Image (cartoon, helix red, strand yellow):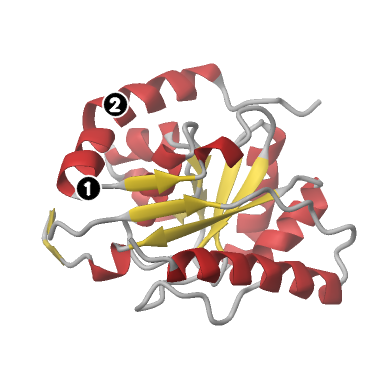
Amino acid sequence: MARNREPVENLILYRLLKWSVIVPILKFYFRNNVYGTENVPQQGPFVVVSNHASDLDPPIVSVCMKRPVAYMAKEELFEVPILKQIITLYGAYPVKRGSADRSAIRSALNSLEQGWAVGIFLQGTRTSDGKITEPKLGATLIAAKAKVPLLPVSIYGTHAVKRQGLIANSVPITVRIGELIPPPESTKKQELELISQKCADIINKMHDLGR
C-alpha cells in the first residue's frame, strides 16, 4: 500500500536543515522570492518538473515545496561521509552510471510509492539560460506509470550563479510554482510528448516573468 507522505524522520531532519541553514542562505544571500506555494500538495506523492541551470536547483526546489523532494544523484555521492546523510534525508536516491534511465525510473517509482514528491528536470540536463528547449519524456512516463500528477516549477536566476570552490556570487533567485497537471492517461509516446510539451510551455512562460 502506497504511503501518503515521505517518512516522518526524513521530514523532521529536512525541516531542521532547512530552517537552520538553507532558508537563511536563500533569503539573505540570494534574496529568494517564491510564488505559488498554495499549489503544492501537502499530502500524497507527485512529480515536480522544472527547468535546470545549476547544481543549486535541487535544494532550492525542495525548500520551496515545504516538503522534501527526492532527486536522483550519482552513486559516488553516497560514498562521501556527511554528504550522504544530507542528501539521503532530502530523499536523494543513487543511480549507477551507464544504467541511469532504467535505474532512475525504478528508483523514482519506488520513492513515489513511499509517499515522496519526486523531482525531475524536464530537459534532463542544465541549460545555459534556464529555458527548456527539448523536454524529455522521463517525467511524464513516471507520472503515467505511478498515476500521480505533475507540478511545473520555474527557477529563475540560478543560470547566473557562478561558483569559485564553495563560494557562489549573490544572485536574486525567483521560484514560481504552477498548478497541478493530471498524469497522462497512458504511456503512449504521443500522449507523453503532449504533456511534456505542456509542462515545458508553462515553465518557460513562468521563467519569462523574470524576477
Q: Marks 2 and 1, Cα distance to the nearest angstrom?
A: 15 Å
Q: Is residue 170 above or below residue 60?
A: below
Q: Secondary structure at mark 1?
A: loop
| Residue 140, numbered circle | none
Quadrant placement of the C terminus: bottom left
Which residue position is annotated with label 1? 31
Q: Is residue 96 left or right of residue 64?
A: right
Q: Is residue 101 above or below residue 49?
A: below
Residue 188 visible somewhere in the drawing: yes
Q: Is residue 152 left or right of residue 1?
A: left
Three-letter amino acid code at the position of disc 2: Trp
Q: Rate crowding at label 2 as few (under 14), some (14 to 19) or many (20 or more) other CA atoms within 10 Å.
A: few
| Residue at figure coordinates x 47%, y 53% from the top left | 176
Quadrant placement of the N terminus: top right
Choose between 148 and 94: the one closer to the eye: 148
The quarter of the displayed image where residue 59 is located: top left
Which residue position is annotated with label 2? 19
